[in-house]
Image (spheres, coloured by chain):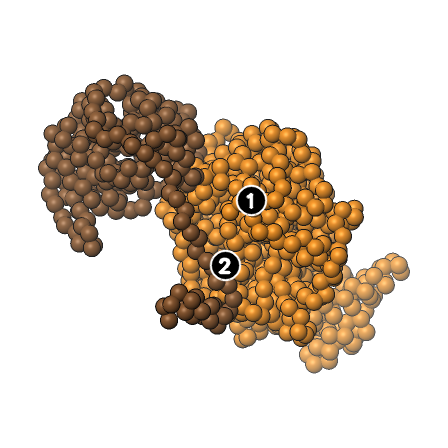
Amino acid sequence: MNIVVAIKHIPSIADDVPVKGNNVDFDSVDFVLNEWDEHSIEQAVLIKEAVGGTVTVIGVDLIGELDNALHLALAKGADKVVKITADDPAADSHMQAKWLSEAIKGMGANMVFAGVQASNDLDGQIGPMIAAYLDMPYIGGVSSVEANSDSATVNKEFAGGAGAKYSVSMPFVAGVQAAPKPPRYAPVSKVRQMAQSATVEKVAPSGDASSGLTFKKMAPPVVTGHAEMIEGSSKEVAAKIVELLKSKGLA
Amino acid sequence: MLTPIEKILFILLALVSAGFTFHGFKTIIDTVRKGRPAPELKNIPASLLKAGVTVLFQRTIFKARKALSAVHLGLFFGLITYAFVNLFDVLEGLIPNFDLTYSGKHLAPPAWTIPLINIYSLVSDVMSMFLLIAITIFLVRRFIVKDKALTYRENVLLNPKVKAGGQAKDSLIVGVFVIMHVTAHVLSQAYRLTEGADPFMPFASFLNSIFGASETGMHVAWWVSIGWVMFIIPYLSRSKHTHFFMAPINLGLAKQNPRGQLDPAIPLKVIDGRKYDPGAKVITDLAWKRILDAYACVQCNRCQDVCPANFYQRPLSPSALEVNKRYLLKEATFGSHPDLLLAPLTETVISPEAVWSCTTCYACVRVCPVGNEPMADIVDIRRRMLIDGFEIDSGVQTALQSLATNGNWMGKGKRLRGRWAKELEFPVKNATEEPVEVLWFVGDTASFDERVIPNTKMVARIFHQAGLDFGILYQNESNAGNDVRRVGEEGLFEQLVEQNMAAFGKAQFQRIVTTDPHSFNTLKNEYPQFGGKFEVKHYTVTLLKLFEEGKLTVKNKLSHYKVTFHDPCYLGRYNGGFTAPRKLLELLGVEFHEMPRNCENSFCCGAGGGQIWMGKVAPGERPAENRIKEALSTFEKHPSDKKQLFIVTCPKDMVMYSDAVKTTGNEGKIEVRDIIQLVAEAVGVEEVSPIVG
Ligand code: SF4
Ligand code: SF4
């Protein structure tokens, strides 16, 4: 089984996200692996462990720091890692999908996984667009994949907790919502070992695409007011709440 | 006394017994040598000698269970006496006329030996009586009273043989042996007394008055007494009572490096070019010392008594761990299951859930009378589980991932670490940009936890008021890695050490002060191994010094407070930091009451060793809740209207105990405060509302 996992490097929201001009100030944020991509890597490795095969992880290197994420993927069980050397932190998901599909084209993938969305733009476009460029079927909201010989049994989740089971013939692209198991932990010693011994294949970005959208303005959220914490015993708190409601004419 | 045929029989028996004994101990030594290299020990003869003295006075067992320990002390002296008794009995058997009754008059000894003979007769006779009583007490305790301290929780993994009462069988055999052996010896002496009572043998004389003297009786009793010994010595090497021999050795070879320094995940010394994976999966992955622990264990469960995880009904018992190891080794070497040496420890000696319940509080190691370190096994097992991809608790995983990317476990960006300092009314120096006298290593909880930050600011204000030249590392500080290492993530620990060492390299300072005892421990005891040689102090010591130098003065005495103090494991038990906080409290003028479990005996809050990261909270009374109750019952003995405070000196404790006060419904009765809050009140530093915010 030949599985390709397309990943995305995105600004971390552990820090404040500063804005510069019409976009994020990319020089003052750290980049991290998109959370949903951790699930698609886990799903790919689980399939490999069940039926054998190879897992290739590929991503666009936006700021020259993708290696960390790729070494992590290797430590978790990926066999091969590839980075598309773009060096453009502002590359949007349309651009990235184009570059990724050009690079994935020649890989002979039976399945391509992508995180169902990424927390920076939340547009969920990369998976469907890769499918379109590669002319493969796409299935999103995936919560588990089981590989058979030339098809896969795929569980997909719908709003409200409903689920459906599909049989999808290969090759196909899946947008992974969650792996059946929480993504495994990669011990740092293993990641470091990979950093020393593994090779990251480099590919130049090829092709051009645009979402046709431009940023007009980006601004940090405006803090409009603080929650007031009412201190004291439960009786005192209750009394104050009643008082407040009264003062607002609500009681 | 013995006939020639008896003598031949005796010599044959002695040879067979010696053969089995030799085989027994050789097997033990060979098994211990299968373990990995342990850190080098220095000056072994001296520490063995010291251990010998300790054992002679049974010092270490008195750390707990005082009354029983006294009986054990008697038992111990009894058995030493009996080593001589057996020697003389054998001489009596082999050498014609060798007879020590009636001051040895049949032997016609030199006059100066007569008092010695009398002393020997009296001591051995009285000791015999005492031994019979003491053994009866121990047997009654185990079999009739069924002391709960000798049992294990239902949920603790136990070797099937232990479950089936293997330890009890062992005790019974040895107990019966001692009773038979001692009785037979005294009878053999009683039968010897052909001339009536011997004033130096009251017990034997008493028996003589009932049974009279008898040549045949003497032979039979002699054979029973010595025959038992020939059987029991080789048996001992295969039973729990190997501790007679192994405990003193183990104590002599006990940990020499600081308590707060874990042994490395991979031995530093390599033998025969062997390759080692980090940590331990099977028993021979443990250091040889840890294998010796199993043989030295007296299976007294003192460690289980003090284990906070065991208290919290977790399936962890440090003693069960040692006992299981022991039974596994026995079946693998003396029994027919050599394959057990390759069985995963998590299936044979400790359950995975138990492995992840340990708070690394060190109480088990501290209390163990024979120098065992069950905690070290647990950390080694965690190390390998992590490498082998064992599924870990989701909370721990999230914390570790955040530590790897952000350098803190709270999922906060590096740049946010110093934000609290920006909110103060004076600037706090960045130690990587300008030289400072004191580098304050703040730690994660104190830097990020909103509940603790007011105290962190208070520390800064007090340092500032006292004119202390201090600075912090801002975003260059990473978690010190104490608990990361104890969770078993050695690689991440090393990464954090490298990050901090790089930050220290950029800074100029004379000494480090920490508010967090966990950071304190690893900076002080483990960073030196990575080249980090600096003076590290806990803030309680720094505060005390500021008072002593007159840089801080108490303006308001705090006599309106009634307080007790919780020793954090990593400040107290690990690093002996007992006095500074107590002296501070005395200076502040509070009414102070000590909880029953204090200093070395302090009871862990339950947060250490990664427990604070756990996503799942188990049901049952938590250690911190139990501790709050302990504080309240301490206060009950000194009733007054004063406000009751539970004083802590660790940011994690602030969080743990504030929660525990709420969950036990004791709000209003007791309040948790960091010692800095009291210092601030006493020296007159008010909480200032933030300028930025
Ligand atoms: S270190 Fe503490 S929690 Fe861990 S086994 Fe020992 S006593 Fe129990
Ligand atoms: S490890 Fe030590 S304290 Fe625990 S049962 Fe064994 S001898 Fe007793």
Disc 1 residue type?
Glu
Describe residue B592's horizontal placement relative to residue B354 as left or right: right
- The residue under label 2 is B309
Going by the numbered disc 2, the residue's amino acid type is Ala
Say which of marks 1 and 2 sits in front.
1
Query: Distance from label 1 to label 2 (Cα)?
Result: 39 Å
Q: Name the subunit of mark 1.
A: B
Chain coloured orange in the rendered structure: B
Assess whether mark 2 and mark 1 are in contact (beta carbons under 8 angstroms). no
Please determine whether, in this image, residue B265 is positioned above or below residue B577.
above
- Work out whether disc 1 and disc 2 sit on a shared chain: yes
Which residue, given by chain and number where applicable, does mark 1 sit on? Answer: B423
Query: Considering depth in this image, is B589 or A55 the residue closer to the camera?
Result: B589
Q: Position of residue A150 (x, y in %)?
A: 11, 35
Point out the residue furthest to the right here: B111
Crowd band around label 1 with a 10 angstrom C-alpha radius: few (<14), some (14–19), many (20+): some
Say which label, 1 or 2, has the lower sequence index. Answer: 2
Chain A: drawing colour: brown
Disc 2 residue crowd, few under 14, some 14–19, many 20+, Cα 10 Å: many
User: Where residue B198 appears, x then y in whole percent?
Assistant: 80, 73
What residue is shown at x 60% (from left), y 59% (from top)?
B673
Query: Which residue occupies the foreground of this view, B461 or B645?
Result: B461
**Between residues A225 and B498, which one lies in front from this camera angle?**
A225
* Residue found at x 41% / y 25%: A196
